[in-house]
Amino acid sequence: MATEEDWDSYVRAVIDIAPPDRDRFRLVPAEVGAVDRWPDGLVAPVVVVTAWNPDSVHLPPGDNRARTLALVTELDRLGVTHWPAVGRDLATTHHEEGVVVSGLTEAEGVEIGLHHGQAAVYVWTPAAWSVVSCTDERRHMSGWRLVDPPPSSG
């Protein structure tokens, strides 16, 4: 279960997204109701999930990457569209590699997150950016903005 400190980090995180056949962008939380134009070709909802650091236990990078491979294998088996993403807490140096998934419902995204030991997933729609708990009813909704990521955010 996420601590208050964990949850605060999830809420302020930005997500660097690398969709196929288009420029990378950064999704940034904004005040409720403030949203940019929805990107062409993306089907909502879009779920962001990671398999890193299950149950908030910090694992070595190699272990986390192996967990990401298991997540990607599961998504491939489900036949859903996905592409790389990196979640970053700009208040710290913490980041986690994950995936952006199109073609899942929020409930399916939460189920996959829980299966991979995650406390929360992100759900992005044209109207909101939400942090959704995988372990209880907790949710934080905000608006969102799209910005260019810095060159080093690779």
Image (cartoon, rainbow, N blue to C red):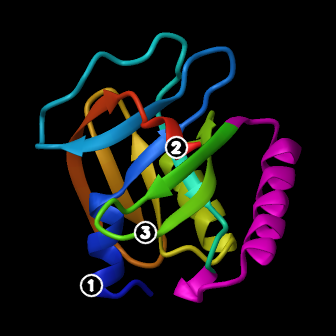
Tag 3–tag 1 contact (CB < 8 Å):
no
* Among the 4 quarters of the image, the one containing residue 29: top left
Q: Hey, what amino acid is under mark 1?
A: Glu
Please tell me whether residue 50 is drawn above or below residue 84 in the rendered image: below
Q: Amino acid at mark 2?
A: Ser
Residue farthest toward the top in the current orientation of the protein: 40
Q: Which residue is mark 1?
A: 4
- Asked which quadrant contains residue 70, the reply is bottom right
Amino acid type, mark 3:
Thr
Q: Residues within 10 Å of mark 3 (few under 14, many from 20)?
A: few
Drawn side of residue 54 relative to residue 142, left or right: right
Q: Residue beneath label 3, please?
A: 93
Q: Which residues are magenta?
A: 54-82
Q: Secondary structure at mark 2?
A: helix
- How far apart in space, not on screen, are marks 3 and 2 (Cα)? 13 Å
Residue under label 2, please give it. 152
Side (left or right) of 106 relative to 35: right
Quadrant containing the N terminus is bottom left
Residue at the spot 78% in from the left edge and 69% down from the top edge: 67
- Give above or below for 137 relative to 123: below
Does dot 1 land on a helix, a strand or a loop?
Answer: helix
Question: Residue at 68% across / 36% down in the picture?
Answer: 83
